[in-house]
Image (spheres, rainbow, N blue to C red):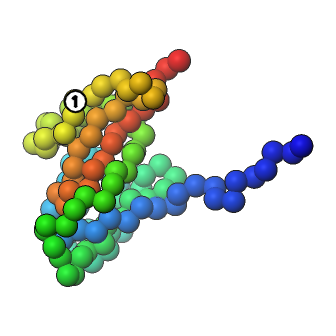
Amino acid sequence: MAAQREPVESISAVTLLTVDMAEAVAFYQELDFHLLYGGHEAPFTSFRVGAGYLNLQLDSVGSPQRAVWGRVVLWVDDVDAMYRRAVTAGFDPETSPADAPWGERYFHIHDPDGHELSFARPLAR
């Protein structure tokens, strides 16, 4: 029996809402995300993330009290180096880097709008 091809190949982009584009763009730039389009004053901003994109869209209704919707997991070359970059930039990650039983080294941090980001890397087996 031939292997069946998955109908969905990959995620091209994730778009997160922000109530303050300037603050959100500054946060991602401090973590070395590569800005492709938009910026501090734009209603829509796009960063390159590997072969995909992380987008920010200005929430014109804006509710600073909205709940966190979930987590975006981003694989990086060096989890500990990304953690140090975040701390050096003055951010307060939710967790320190740790090895998880599911086979990743990771840490969690929230962006200025409360979206949870997990920076991770598979553990060598």
Q: In the rendered image, which quarter is residue 66 located in?
A: bottom left
Q: Nearer the viewer, residue 98 or 37?
A: 98
104 to 49, vertically: above or below:
above
88 to 42, vertically: above or below:
above
What residue would you read off at disc 1?
A: 96
Q: Nearer the viewer, residue 89 or 2?
A: 2
* x and y, in percent, of residue 50 in the image: 47, 49
Quadrant in which the N terminus appears = top right
* x and y, in percent, of residue 20 in the image: 16, 69
Q: Which residue: 13% across, 43% down?
A: 91
Q: For the view shown, which residue lies furthest in the bottom direction?
A: 61
The mark tally for this picture is 1
Q: Which residue: 18% across, 39% down?
A: 93
Determine whether the residue tagged by mark 1 lies in a helix, strand or loop.
loop
116 with respect to 103 (left or right): left
Q: Is residue 14 visible?
A: yes
* x and y, in percent, of residue 76 in the image: 40, 37
Query: What's the amino acid at mark 1?
Result: Ser
Q: Nearer the viewer, residue 98 or 101?
A: 101
